[in-house]
Image: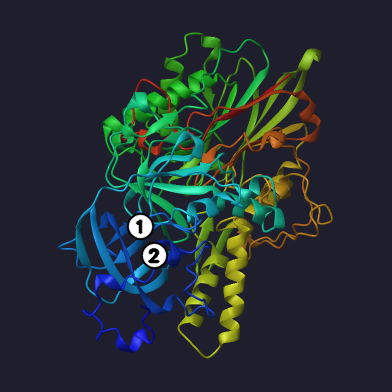
Amino acid sequence: MLFNDAYANESSNKNNINCIDENSSISQLQGEGARSPYVIKKGNKRFRSDSFFTVKGVVTKLKEGRNAGFFMQQIDKSMLSLASKGIFVRTADMKNIKPDTSVCVTGFVEEYYGMTQLHLTADVIVLGDAKGVAPTNIIVAAVDANFSETLERYEGMRVRLVNMTDMRVTKPLYYDRRWQRYNIILSHQQVNIHPNTTAFPGSILADQHALNNKQRRLYLQLSGRPAYIQSDYIRVNDKVAGVVSILQFSYGEFRLVTADRVSKIQFTHLSDRETLPPRTTQHLRIASFNLLNYFNSIAGGANNPLRHNRGAATLLALYRQETKLVKTIVTLDADFIGLMEVENNGFGENSAVQRLLSLVNRQIKDPDKHYKMLQPDKSDLYRGRYLGSGAITVAGFYRPSKLKHVVTRVIDLPIQRSILGNAYHRPALTPTFMRERGHKKENEQLTISVNHFKSKGSKCAADKQRSAMLKRLKNSSKDRAALEKWQRTKLKLKQDRQGHCAMFRSLAASVLARSLALQGGDKIILGDLNSYPKEDPLLVLTDYKQDRYAYYKIKGSAHSYLDQQLIDLKLDYGFGYHDPFVYENTDSWTYSFQALGRLDYILVSSDLLSDVVVKKVWHINAAESRLLNKDKGFLNDIAFSSDHDPLFIELE
């Protein structure tokens, strides 16, 4: 029978429901859509059915802790072939409930953060032991418009990933600090690429890419700390099968929470680790590499301006990090390499850059291939010693046998000062060389600017202003129109997907390019620009024109200063640099967050583009698990020597 007016009678009916009152099935409650057909959404305020139901099933898993309860699944065939047969029952009282028992439950149907569940209105009736529920293979149906619809058909069920499911690793094993758990992010049939890789921010095409990524995504959540075995490494694009678990949905994502060890999951390498063959040409090789906080503080290094150690916390961790970094740099065999995230503790004997230079040269037998480091004039340094005022900086090594050093300049980039706080970029380390160009053997001037733009994580003034305004308006119910306006602005920025400080990075790009325009010869801008290929800073450096990008407008940040002068620049055109990797954007990723993308660049001036004969991103880091870092990694390989992939070009 069906009970109506349940809200009023919930307490009186608590123990009056007999198992013979079964009036529905789990699949009927789930329905064939994203929501239960019994939960009719009215605005944003409806998440529970008007009626309550009694259903029977077999307990498949207990969930303890926060939002405790159990999963149950019907074992008889359903008339609704596209509806899930599993559901979550939320309850804190599970003393008589265990897996593989048949139960009868009564309650309202709810949608809790997108997952269909039952809210009990009567005690659970345990009917007795039952045969365990066999896992159902997740198979895409012809009627599924996307993979999210496929997963919806299995929500709450005990399922298995099989080869036919075709799930790929799009982010390898990592530790989620916010929720304190280990995850692997999977994607159906592909690895997910950041939308701003091929479409400019906030465009319809970028939104389509983002939706496609989300519809393919599945989190594999491990219940404990996994043992990571070197021979059983996990990489991007590995095919995953053999996982058996309950399919859950929470906070906008489908998840498989498994107690299986990583070693029990089947990983098939579809894109194996890359080796870099020895160089066979005399072309000029130029590389860029973010070192992921190379600090020598723990080994008695000099202090940086902030006296912060963001790097290795022990000598063993430093030894591991240096072993991997030195192997990577030596194998890259570049004639010039720009480095990011080096401790900013000067250029002396106890500096990080000097220590790394010595370690690298020690591994190179041919003296003609030894490196020298770039060292600016003291007058260009902060306090006559530091390249910038932060804990990290940029650096550069070059081979005097291939490049004749002329001068090293420091290009200061904007500083943001406001009552909400300050923000900084690292200064650009910008040497000029003479080099032999092509078959002509003519000495020509080449300027290379090594950069590390402000990150996407920490907030700039505009981001802080928006957060403060939203907080103030949320605490006040008087100005609903203003709150809705600011909420729309926040949503628009979220859909923009550029992260924090995009305007500050765009302004830095313009200042950098304007400064380089005053110098003659060929030019290269390289480094970690903390921007995906179609984001504002890259458009400013390359081919931006409003009519070319559907009148998409780029803005610079307010409250920004250079040499104590307030900056007021219009960002209405690009500076014409070329990205040699632009036509391989979906394969030339260098970094992994929730999706893969490229934050690292080697941009060349127009006259230099025809000289580029080789271009490569060496996928040794972004495709690997972060559990291989300096604190937990292995020494006899270079996998995850950093969190960014190195990349290089060769000039004829």
User: As rendered, which of 157 and 631 lies closer to the eye?
Assistant: 157
Disc 2 + disc 1, Cβ < 8 Å: yes
User: In this figure, which residue is indicated by the disc labeled 1?
Assistant: 74
Can residue 616 be seen in this snapshot? yes
- Hey, what amino acid is under mark 1? Gln
Disc 2 to disc 1, C-alpha distance: 7 Å
Based on the displayed image, in which of its 4 quarters is residue 507 positioned?
Answer: bottom right
Q: Dot 2: within a 10 Å radius of its alpha carbon, few (fewer than 14), some, or many (20 or more) residues?
A: many
Based on the displayed image, in which of its 4 quarters is residue 590 positioned?
Answer: top right
Q: Position of residue 218 (x, y in %)?
A: 47, 48
Q: Position of residue 256 (x, y in %)?
A: 38, 49
Tell me which label, 2 or 1, sits earlier in the chain. Answer: 2
Classify residue 329 as left or right of residue 445: left
The disc label shown at residue 14, or none:
none
The disc label shown at residue 25, or none:
2
Q: Position of residue 342 (x, y in %)?
A: 45, 37
What kind of element bears circle 2?
Answer: loop
Q: Position of residue 619 (x, y in %)?
A: 53, 29
Classify residue 139 as left or right of residue 603: left
Task: Give the residue drawn at x 49%, y 19%.
Answer: 330
Task: Give the residue drawn at x 55%, y 58%.
Answer: 500
Which of the image's four quarters has the C terminus? Answer: top right
Which of the image's four quarters has the N terminus? Answer: bottom left
Task: Give the residue drawn at x 37%, y 61%.
Answer: 87
